[in-house]
Image: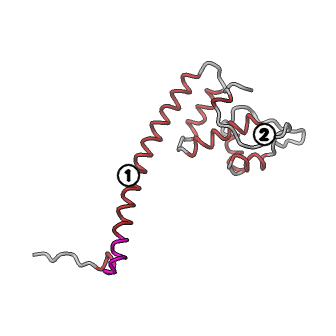
Amino acid sequence: MDRVPPALTPQLDADVPEEGLSIGEASAAVGLSVQALRYYEREGLLLDPTPRRSNGHRRFHRNDLDWLVGLVMLRETGMPIAEIRDVAALSRTPGTERERLKAFELHRQAVLAQLKRTQEHLAALDTKIAAYRAYVAGEEGTIHDEQPPARP
């Protein structure tokens, strides 16, 4: 199904044969473990049910893989599974573009807040590294060798 226009889904940079990819090939292509891919399927995170061959083996096609690439991106930006499940449910329902937009805007705010915290932590780490480099360069011993000031 094409309920989510391709322009709104990240595209997998790989050739996908007409018969699709096995679960192992799909997991490697999108950067998920086979267990994670099965979990995503069980949790209802996929846009459509995964087609199966007569022997029961899953086959992932281009639209499935592109959707999975988007899920990986959302997880890597910290979107909780529950929110991804909500986005998937909305994406299965025509006319929910405004709700999807709102979900992505809210997640963007969360990503920006996390980015700010990460930048603050990086600055603190850089300060520590600079202090340790100064001690090492000065051969003044270790930071723990310093004696605290005497109390009056």
Quadrant of the rendering where the N terminus is positioned: top right
Please give left or right for residue 23 compared with residue 99 in the image: right
Please give left or right for residue 50 compared with residue 72 in the image: right
Q: Is the magenta region chiefly helix, strand or loop?
A: helix
Image mark for residue 62: none
State the extent of the magenta-drawn residues as a range. 132-142
Residue 56 horizontal/vertical position (percent) = 85, 41
Quadrant of the rendering where the C terminus is positioned: bottom left
| Label 2 vs label 1, nearer the camera | 1
Residue 141 horizontal/vertical position (percent) = 32, 81
Q: Amino acid at mark 1?
A: Glu
Q: Residue at x 37, y 71 (%)?
A: 133
Q: Amino acid at mark 2?
A: Phe
Q: Residue at x 78, y 37 (%)?
A: 61
| Alpha carbons under labels 2 and 1: distance apart | 41 Å
Q: Which residue is mark 1?
A: 120
Please give left or right for residue 136 compared with residue 93 in the image: left
Residue 100 horizontal/vertical position (percent) = 56, 27
In the rendered image, the vertical position of residue 99 relative to residue 128, given as above or below? above
Q: Which residue is mark 2?
A: 60
Give the residue at the far left of this rendering: 152
Residue 71, picture quadrant:
top right
- In depth, the one of 24 and 116 nearer the eye is 116
Mark 1 element type: helix
Residue 75 horizontal/vertical position (percent) = 58, 44
